[in-house]
Amino acid sequence: MINIFTLLRRQFLSYFRAPLGYALIIVFLIISGLSFCRLISQSATEPFQIGDILFGSAYFWLILLATIALITMPLFAEERHSGTIETLLTAPVTDLQVVLAKFTAAFAFIFVMLSPTLCYGVILYLFNADGGALAYKPIAAGYLIVFLISAFYTAFGLLMSSLTRSVVVSAILCCIGMSVTFLAENLQYALHNVWLERILAQISSVQHVVDFSRGIVDSQPVYFYLSGTVLFLYLAVKSIESRLWR
Amino acid sequence: MTKGFSSGTALHGISFEVQRGEMLGFLGPNGAGKSTTMRIMAGYLAATEGSVQIDGLSVLEHSLDVRKRIGYLPENVALYPEMRVNEYLYFRGRLKGMGGRRLRARLGEVKSLCGLHEVSGRIIAHLSRGYHQRIGLADALIHEPELLLLDEPTIGLDPNQLRAIRSLIKTLGQRYTVVLSTHFLSEAEMLCERVLILNHGRIVASDSPAVLTSLLKNKTVIVAEVAGAHSEVAAVLRGLPGVSGMFWNPCRNANDNHPEQEWNRYVLECNTDDDIRSGVFAAVAQRGWKMRELKLERKKLEDAFAEITGNVRTESK
């Protein structure tokens, strides 16, 4: 446990030792803030669900997924490229501890980046035109799906990073994977296959976001993202272990 | 152990032991398998066949226990450049299971042993390669390992850094069991009690530098600069007792590097430990030739290495 915390701390602080970490947070907050303002002003004329205002912006998701690709790409690829992986994996730590620490550090960065957006909920509460109680369920369910999707793609990005020594290749692989699953629903129209359409509809993150941000908490996506996260972390451990027999 | 990669076999069934307190040197040309052996010993790679046991524990089966017992300095010392020296060593100490007073005390010890006190607050990226090596060594030492694995610890250093790191390794050799791989034969000769010469993934020699040198066919070399008819001088020198081979080249003028008219430089290879310079001098003086240099060079580990790995000098009798 001490090992995981030691590794996690180093990895997490490394995001803030370079301007990239601060830049990502600032850009994310500016873009998500602007899209929040735009949706608020639109809601004056069109009926909007509260969850749509908070999580319905394409810009919000675009910058969130781009951030995940950028913060996960160096996790192992950079260590391989610089050679620090050799000293890291010959220290008395297990491969599982290394993978868990890196995943937690990246996820913690996402958490820190997302936490200021809670103030949007506070703003909606303070300026609720109806004067009635704010619907907390869509907000809570919306944040649940945001964190589940973030964990899923963080684990996926970490796996991609473990497969290569190039941070650029890692980011490209991560972006391709994220685009395919996030926009899976759109692919079904091109495939014309009933079974594939069903599978793609199940894994499409867009549909999950729409449902959760309206307060519909379905257990199927929860299991899907949690099991996917665990699977990617398991595969990342195996990918790191593969150095022994390759 | 044997280690195969998709590109070919790096190690072909090598086997060796290192005694506690010993300093063992790995020598070998590029691609001989030195770093692969080190990585297998450190637990970074696994042997395709065979195993490594350190202190009676299998590196693969008791990986964490073994890692606590070894300090590993890889070939390319890679550090986290954004961290400060103190912070990096503290991080590595924590990772190796240390903490509290013990870690703080040990930090002071390794910094003083590796000469890092003056840079302990500086960012690693701003330090020279020599300091990077020292930080790598301090990291390898911080948890007081029983075995130190140093893979090319002096590669890429300038002469001053080279001297400092060698002297540090010599000091470490008095306290730790050390396995050192190096390209520098003089380094192995200076530091190691025993050397293993690896070539194409096989151990081709294993003994002390002195014994390996004594096994050479030609043990000493006499260099003489003589002015005289070349064919006669060559015939006389080649016929002297104890001379097993000879090559020569014209002396060059120190100013313009042009060959000098009458002076030639003769290199006599001797198959004996005896000093035959007096015989060379007598032969030259007797015939009235002029001589301006006569020196004896004892062969070194470098020559043994070249002979064992098959890169013997081509110029010969």
Image (cartoon, rainbow, N blue to C red):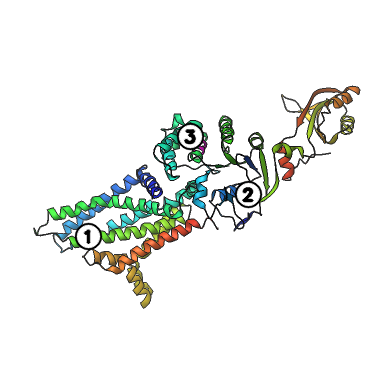
Q: Tell which of B191 and B306 is nearer to you.
A: B191
Q: How many marks?
A: 3
Residue indicated by mark 3? B110
Check disc 1 and give the amino acid type. Answer: Ala
Residue under the point 31% across and 54% down: A63
Residue indicated by mark 1? A140
- In 3D space, how far apart are the residues under numbered discs 2 and 1 (Cα atoms)? 58 Å
Residue B75 placement: quadrant: top right
Check disc 3 and give the amino acid type. Answer: Val
Q: Nearer the viewer, mark 3 or mark 2?
A: 3
Q: Position of residue B269 (x, y in %)?
A: 81, 35
Q: Tell which of B25 and B292 is nearer to you.
A: B25
Pick whichever of labels 3 and 2 is earlier in the sequence: 2
Q: Secondary structure at mark 2?
A: loop
From the viewer's perspective, is residue A75 above or below residue B169? Answer: below
Q: Tell which of B131 and A130 is nearer to you.
A: B131
Q: Nearer the viewer, mark 1 or mark 3?
A: 3
Pointers 3 and 2 within a single chain: yes
Mark 1, other Cα within 10 Å: few <14 / some 14–19 / many ≥20: some
The chain letter under disc 1 is: A
Magenta-tinted stretch: B133-137
Residue indicated by mark 2? B33
Farthest-out residue, front: B56
Q: Main secondary structure of the magenta part?
A: helix
Q: Position of residue A8 (x, y in %)?
A: 38, 48
The chain letter under disc 2 is: B
Q: Are marks 1 and 3 in contact (CB under 8 Å)?
A: no
